[in-house]
Structures are given as structure tokens and as C-alpha cells.
Amino acid sequence: MDNMMDEISQRANLAFSNQMEMLTFFLSDKQQYGVNVFKIIEVVETPKEITEMPQTQPAIVGAMDFRGKVVTVIDLGLALGLAPIQVGKELSYVIVCEYSGMIQGLMVSQPNKLITRSWEEIKSPGSNFLDNAYLTALTYEKNGDAIQILDVEKILGEIIGSDEIIADELLAKKQEVDISNFKVMVVDDSKAARGQIEKTLEQMGTPYESFNAAAQAYEYLLHNYQSSSDPLYALIISDIEMPGMDGFTFTRKMKQHTDTRLSTIPMALHSSMSNESNRVKALEMGADDFIPKYQANSIASLVLRWHAKVSGQV
């Protein structure tokens, strides 16, 4: 396991080139799943005893001590409707991850291996499937076996919840400015994440258009800016992890475009990979801003901040 974590650290520091570094693992159904290594802090054997947490969602097994911190442990298979892991009776592991500023433990049957995939090799299972499932993307082994990439944000949102209420002071600031013409483009392959951003923008009174793929959004921008003399968007909020084209590549293409109407649109990357190192990497890739997912106040503050900058108030 130590060797696996050393390799995770090495892979997490690779230069961004539209690739996903993935740890694959198995659940009780013996299917292979994957999670981005950027979100992983450590993989540990499940403690023999986990402190139970009464009156919680069934998939929450309890809490464990991790480096002196209390970490909630979620049976990932049980959250998907699979057979639960028998803690203390069978060998299992906890993938300790950071999502949107919070550390969670995802309990799995067995970690498998580390693989690298181009985002072009990672496919969306289709919009109709995504509406009702926890699967956000698929990729394949050389022998044709599928690796299912889960929408962990959606799972955590349903189990733990997300912050959808904007603070009163931010709503008060919104009343002091006119942001009705501050149009935002939202790009995220997760329906749950798009919905959370859209709810926040609606509370702010900010017009928006949403896209579920960076490649689609980029082509839309290219086509429409050719026939328009005015900027279509005042701000773009984009996820990082997306099939086909990731947010880093999307940002780089926008910032390197010869048409200044495209290259000067503020690009804010919005990700559950929310630690400081990923903020730094996002800015190195040319992003103008970076905010964690599932934090309504962060989105509201972002809109107010960039409205002020674009309108020359700061």
C-alpha cells in the first residue's frame, strides 16, 4: 500500500496534459470503479472498529480517526445499492479523499491499480443515463473490461448534503449592483453540480447557459463568436474533470486563442479537488479564479467579484 501511495504522489504531480490519473478499485459486485488520484490523501485498511454515528444516512458506517481527525466513513457500495461490507468480519479499505474542502472516507472492498487515461479515452455514458445514475463516465481496459467512474459529488450530495443557501450579506451586496446582464457560462458533466451552480445563479439573478461537456462549450463559443461582435459571456465557470476535454485543456485553449474576445473572458475553475495545490495548478494553467464545488457562498462571491472587475469597480 505504501508503494501505491508513493506512485499516487508522483502521478498527482505530473504536468497537466488532458489526462486523468486514476486509482481503480472493486466493490462487492466485483465491478471495477475509478477515482481521480488528485482527490486521494491516503488508502488505509479499514479499522476493525468504527465509531457508529446514530441517526445518519444508512451508507454512513460511522467515523474513524485519521491522523488525529475524525473522518466520516461511507460504504460506497451500500450508497450504490450494493451489498454492505461487514466491518470487522471481512478485509476492506478506506480511500481517504478530499472533496470540496471536506475529508471523507470511501470504504471499498479492494483497491486495484493505478492507471493513466487521456480524457479523450474517457466517455460519457449519455445524458439520459446520467439523469438517474451515479455513473459519470466510462473508460476501458485493453481487454475491453469497463472501468466505471462514479459521480462521487452526487453521492456525497445525497448522503451529506450541500450548501445551497447564500449568506444574507452576499444577497445584500447583490441588491447594490445590477448583474442582470452579467451572463455566465456553466460547464460541468455532473448534473448535480450543474444544478447547484444554476440554483445559486438564479438566487443571484444572474443569467446563464449550461453545457455538460467542455468540448461542446468550446465549439459553441468558436461558432457564435464568429457571428457576433459582442462578448456572449462575462464569466465562464468550468469543472476540471470532464470526459473528452478536461477543464485545464479548455482553459488553455481559451487563453491561447488569437481572438481577444475569447481569451479575455474570465475563466473560473470549479472543482471538488479543492486543496491549495490544485488552486495553484489551476492558476498555473491560466485560470483567472478557482473555487470549490458545492459552496453557494463561493459561487455568489465569485460572481460579485468578477462583476466588479469587469465593470471597472475595482
Image (spheres, grey):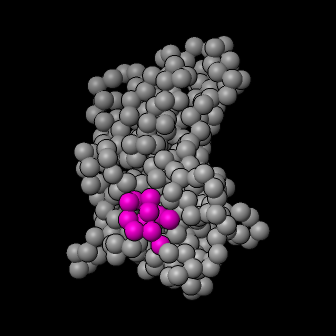
Q: Residue furthest front?
A: 54
Question: Looking at the rendering, which quadrant does residue 13 occupy?
Answer: bottom right
**In the figure, is residue 174 to the left or right of 202?**
right
The x, y position of residue 86, in whole percent, is: 50, 75
The x, y position of residue 120, in whole percent, is: 31, 60
Q: Which residue is drawn at the image coordinates 50% and 82% (left, top)?
A: 90
Magenta stretch: residue 260 in it?
A: no
The x, y position of residue 176, in whole percent, is: 66, 13
Q: Which residue is drawn at the image coordinates 57% and 13% (left, top)?
A: 178
Q: Residue furthest right?
A: 68
> Is 8 or 126 nearer to us in this picture?
126
Q: Which residue is drawn at the image coordinates 58% and 52% (left, top)?
A: 56
Q: Is residue 125 visible?
A: yes
Q: Which residues are magenta?
A: 75-85
The x, y position of residue 228, in whole percent, is: 33, 23
Q: Residue furthest left?
A: 144
Question: Looking at the rendering, which quadrant does residue 45 occupy?
Answer: bottom right
Q: Is residue 15 visible?
A: no
Q: Quadrant of the C terminus?
A: top right
**In the figure, is residue 32 to the left or right of 70?**
left
> Is 35 or 154 nearer to us in this picture?
154
**In the figure, is residue 169 to the left or right of 87?**
right
Relative to 80, residue 3 above or below: below
> Is 160 or 220 nearer to us in this picture?
160
> Is 186 or 26 nearer to us in this picture?
26
Question: Looking at the rendering, which quadrant does residue 244 occupy?
Answer: bottom left
